Amino acid sequence: MTRFVHIDYPTSHPGVNRFENAVALASRVRQGFNSTRGLSSMLLAAMVSALLVVADQVVDTWADGHLMAAWVLMWALGFAALALLATPSRALVMRALSAVNRWLMDTSRARADARMWAIAEQDHRVMADLHAAQTRAQRLSRVGW
């Protein structure tokens, strides 16, 4: 009589599965993160709080016995400010971040060019390559490429 033994071994380790799931979750969370959202929220909160401080000063002189009306007015002003200033604050943050990114790219390119020129001053082969690239670019610009 022949017997076959079938032992089912797991093909993966449970700890490895948990780790892979955690890494996948972290990458999904990172993809959903938008740095402009947090920055624009902070800017919006600052603008609304400044507006509420000014409104509080105005209402404080006006509301001697009308505390409930002043409270309702302050909250209405706060919610209106949130609704009206959300889009402009996000646009302001986007413009500021794009300006900072352009500035960083420009300075990075300038530093890379300075390093390349310093290397070219030491090595005549690199200098010859730079001159050839400049000549080629000038020729292509005259042709209209």
Image (cartoon, rainbow, N blue to C red):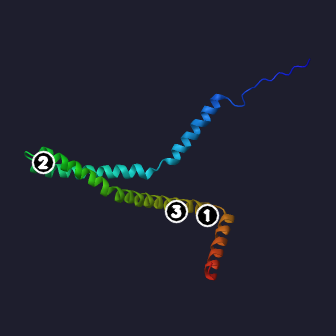
The picture quadrant where one finds residue 14 is top right
Q: Quadrant of the C terminus?
A: bottom right
The residue most toward the left is 64
Q: Position of residue 134 (x, y in %)?
A: 62, 73
Residue position for label 1: 121
Assess disc 1: are there few (<14), some (14-19) or many (≥20) residues with their C-alpha within 10 Å of its C-alpha: few
Q: Nearer the viewer, residue 45 or 83?
A: 83
Residue 132 vertical position relative to residue 119 in the rendered view, above or below = below
For the point 26% across and 49% down, which residue is it?
49
Tell me the SS state at disc 2.
Answer: helix
Q: Position of residue 35 (x, y in %)?
A: 45, 50
Residue position for label 2: 60
Tell me the SS state at disc 3.
Answer: helix
Sequence order check, earlier mark of 1 and 3: 3
Q: Nearer the viewer, residue 106 or 78?
A: 78
Return the mark for residue 110.
Answer: 3
Measure the C-alpha gap from mark 2 to mark 3.
55 Å
